[in-house]
Image (cartoon, rainbow, N blue to C red):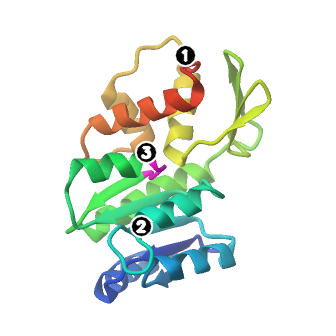
Amino acid sequence: MERPKILVVDDESRMRKLVKDFLTKSGYEVQEAADGSEALDLFFAQKNISLVILDIMMPKVDGWQVCREIRAYSNVPIIMLTARGDERDELQGFQLGVDEYISKPFSPKILVARVEAILRRTSQVNTEEELEAGGIRLDKAAHIVTIADQKVELSYKEFELLAYFMENKGIALSREKILNHVWDYDYFGDARTIDTHVKKLRSKMGKRES
């Protein structure tokens, strides 16, 4: 069985080695990039990257631009790393389609757990399952959402949120339930993350998912 391939992008060689060592021990294949330009070249050359771990502050092309260019072509899960704890950075990341946001310094074990949680969800998709409600059609196997046959581009987390809402239509869902299901038990971030994602999702869906 082919191992999932993860692209680790950081201009600090020690950080890349640390992350790579932990991911490799957990059974993943790791590709490294020292700047944003190299990251984009690798991503579009490989074509089979399962997940991207992306630093923000880098030479040549920063993490924001890398995220924009990847999102223009792919919904591959992206975990953003940053040395800054600015809430504005976190909000900007989510608005660009980042799926997880981790501030440095961080526990490599927690990072691996986040990676495992995301990839576990993608591998557990039922290839025959489709959801439909209010004119919205969600295909879990193809990871596609359409409204009136028009495709809607969603990030991985936005897709997971919409699927969870459609699966639980008419049920009041607490932030805790949403965190436990969509972000998994290992998420230790602020519950406002949900509000940010829901706001973005509503904007893309024209508020039809409510």
Name the residue located 33 percent from the left edge and 65 percent from the top edge: 81
Tell me the residue that label 3 is attached to: 95
Residue placed most toward the observer, 131 or 96? 96
Please give the name of the residue rendered at 38% of the width and 61% of the height, measured from the top-left corner.
80
- 163 inside magenta stretch: no
SS for tag 2? helix
Q: How far apart are the alpha carbons under marks 3 and 2?
A: 14 Å
Outermost residue on the right side: it is: 149
Residue 9, compared with residue 138, is above or below; it is: below
Identify the residue under disc 2: 63
Amino acid on which disc 3 is placed: Gln
Residue farthest to the front, as pictured: 60
The Cα atoms of the two marked residues, 1 and 2, are separated by: 36 Å
- Residue 97 is inside the magenta segment: yes
Which quarter of the image is occupied by the N terminus? bottom right
Q: CA distance from mark 3 to mark 1?
A: 25 Å
Write down the region rendered in magenta: 95-99
Please say if 188 is above or below 130.
below
Q: Secondary structure at mark 1?
A: loop
Q: Position of residue 60 (x, y in %)?
A: 43, 80
Q: Quadrant of residue 58?
A: bottom left
**Of callouts 1 and 2, which one flags the residue occurring earlier in the amino acid sequence?**
2
- The reply to whether dot 1 and dot 2 touch (C-beta < 8 Å) is no
**Residue occupying the point 31% across, 50% down:** 90
Residue 177 screen position, x and y as percent:
36, 29
Q: Identify the mark at residue 169; answer none if there is no mark.
A: 1
